[in-house]
Each structure stands twice: as C-alpha cells, then as structure tokens.
Amino acid sequence: MRLYVALKVVLRLIFVILNNIYCIPTYCVWMLMLLPFRKLYPSLYWKMEGLFFNWLLAMVTMWSWTAGYDLVEVGDDIRICLEDRTLVIVNHQSTSDVPMLMANFNARPGVVPNIMWIMDWIFKLTNFGIVSIVHQDFFILSGKKQRDKGVKELRTHLRECYIPRKRKLMVLFPEGGFLRKRLESSQRYAMKNNLPVLNHVTLPRLGAFHAIFDELTPVQVTKYGSGNENFGSHDDIGALNADKLMWILDVTVGYPEGKPLDLPTIVMGYRRPCKTHLCYRLYPASQVPRDHEGMTKWLFDRWVEKEKMLETFYRTGDFPYESFCPSGKPMAPQVVRQDCLKFFILHVFFIASSYVHYQLIVYLLSLI
C-alpha cells in the first residue's frame, strides 16, 4: 500500500510539473502574440485572455478532480448572481481554498473569465503568478504596516482594471490569512475588545471590504428592506445598474473533519479521496449598512454564523444550511460535476500549441 501511494505521488508530481510546462508558457506566448489587439481591439483581447484563463483554471481543477477531492455545494442558488457584479467573501483555511473555488467556478460556463481574484502578494511568486498578473488579478500587501497602502492600491485597481474590464465576480478572503496562522491573534483581539471568540474562523478585516463598497456603491433598493426574506428576480435587479455591486455571495468552505487540504496534497494526491463542502448564502448588496459600525457588525455577524455552521458540520458532517440561508429556499447538497472530455480536449490544445510555439521559436532563432 505504501509503495502504491509513493508511486502515485511521484507520477502525479511529474504530471503536474509537465502540465505547468506545456500550459503556462503556452498561455504567455499566446498573450504575447495577441498583445497588439490590446490597443487596437481591447474588447477582443480581453475576451481571448478570459478564454485562455478559463482553460488554465480547468487544468488546476483537473488536479483535484483526478485525486478524488470532490466538491459538494449546498445553500442558496447562486445562478441569479453570476451575471451581476458580485463580491464573493470566503473563509480562509489553507492553500487549497483557491484551487477548490477554481474547481467550483470551472464547472459553471462563462463564469471564470469574468472573475477577479484578490490574493496575498506572495502568490505573485508562484508558477501561476504571471497568469494572474496578465489577467489583472489583485495582489494585496499583507502585514499591519502595509494594510493601508494595500487598501489604497485596491481602490486604484478597481477603478483602472476591474471596472474597465467589466468583470462580474470578485473573490475576497476578509480574514486576511490562513486560519492556523491567525487564530491565536484573532482570539486575543476578540477577548480584548469583547467580541465573539471564534475557533473555526477568524474575525474578518474590514479594509478591503469597505474599499470595494466605496468604489462600487450599490443602488439602494428599498424593496429589499433590511430583512433576508425578499428576493427580487434577476431581471429586476440587473436592470437597475449593471455597473454597481449588486450581490454579496458568502461562501463557507468546510473540509471533512475540519482537516483542510493544501496545495501539495492536491498536487500529489497522497490523502484519501474526500468531499469538500461549499455552503452558499446570497445577500443583495443593498442590505449591507454603509456606515463603518454597521458594516463591521454585518460582516462580523456573517462570520459568527459561519462559526456555528462549521461547528455543526464538523460534528455531524452536514451543513445546517436550512437555518442560515437568506433566500429561505436553499438547494440540497449536490456534487459539483466536472467535464472530463473538456480536460482531454484542452490537453490536446495546449500540447499542440506548445509544439507549434517551439517550432516557431526555433525558426525565428535560425534567422538570427
């Protein structure tokens, strides 16, 4: 058994390395070849970039899928928000959170090209960093001293990149770091300031969340009131103002037995197959108070609810979604299905592209 696991780890590691070699450079070469269109026909350039970005995220999705790390989604139906400006807020446990979210969005046609990710600046140094830079994701500075500077740069990025690209979803981890790294300091802060002491999540930070609301001020829709029971139709909301933030999608990630996966595990697949749960709760952005105190309380309340949901999930294996979903009509748990034929076709495309690019580079070098 140990020999089998060791062989599996080695083979997967070799495959993922090769997968990166024939995918990421190919993406960069295609983007370089399309670069003239960025000035001449920007809409075409960004449409093509989004398509290639989507295909690359499918490759990352394939790593977790082939290892047997499936996703189960439960809670509010999020299809009504995917074509509107939506802020996705997620609890942050480990390096596997981003790949698992990528796998989830990959299963939904047309979503991935319109996502902007807000990530720690350290991800710039990873193999996927160059892809995120080209895609115009945002790398936020970590650390207390850099926090104000990071928030200011985020505001600029929203005005200069996110809005002009007409992106829809934006993914933010308000906790600002992994659970294991921030838990102790978060609990100390909570006890010092008479706030809820949490064990399965950490208190969220408000800087980036507040900045996003300031730059993407939602239309105040009085028909929703302050309650959670009234949901308008997609057409009613989308017609108000397509450029404004319309929804807050709160995603709670729950790993089996409270033991998060991580990126090395996803790459090498040495942990047994398991199911990671994603619980969705969808709120109209107009429900979020705009004053600092009210916004802080609203966000803290969501995290206290996450704590209760995760406590139940870790104890029973099921999310208590019926008690916490704002729509009042949550969907039952269902496994996120991936398209293996899509994975095969994309492999053929990237390998063929790599061969063509290699031959082109060899030819150009021969002319020097």
Image: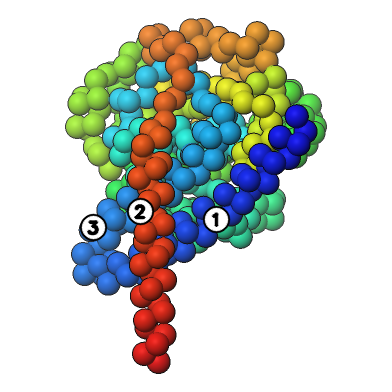
Query: Which of pointers 2 and 3 lies earlier in the amino acid sequence?
Result: 3
Q: Residue at x 35, y 45 (%)?
A: 345
Give SS at disc 2.
helix
The amino acid pointed to by label 3 is Ser
The answer to whether mark 1 and mark 2 are in CB contact below 8 A is no
Q: Nearer the viewer, mark 3 or mark 1?
A: 1
Q: Is residue 94 above or below residue 22?
A: above
Q: Residue at x 51, y 11 (%)?
A: 321
- Say few, some or many: other residues with alpha carbon within 10 Å of mark 1 (under 14 / 14 to 19 / 20 or more): few
Residue on which disc 2 sits: 349
- In the picture, the disc for residue 145 is none
- Say few, some or many: other residues with alpha carbon within 10 Å of mark 3 (under 14 / 14 to 19 / 20 or more): some
Q: Nearer the viewer, mark 2 or mark 3?
A: 2
Q: Residue at x 35, y 53 (%)?
A: 349
**Mark 3 to mark 1 CA distance (whole Å):** 32 Å
The answer to whether mark 3 and mark 1 are in CB contact below 8 A is no
Q: Image check: 36 left or right of 208?
A: left
User: Percent from the top left, x then y, of residue 92?
Assistant: 62, 35
Residue on which disc 3 sits: 43
User: Percent from the top left, x then y, of residue 168?
Assistant: 34, 41
Query: Which of pointers 1 and 2 lies earlier in the amino acid sequence?
Result: 1
- Say few, some or many: other residues with alpha carbon within 10 Å of mark 2 (under 14 / 14 to 19 / 20 or more): some
The amino acid pointed to by label 2 is Phe
Q: Quadrant of the N terminus?
A: top right
Give SS at disc 3.
helix
User: Of all residues shown, which one is farthest toward the bottom?
Assistant: 368
Residue on which disc 1 sits: 18
Query: Which of pointers 3 and 1 lies earlier in the amino acid sequence?
Result: 1
Would you identify the image quadrant in which residue 109 lies? top left
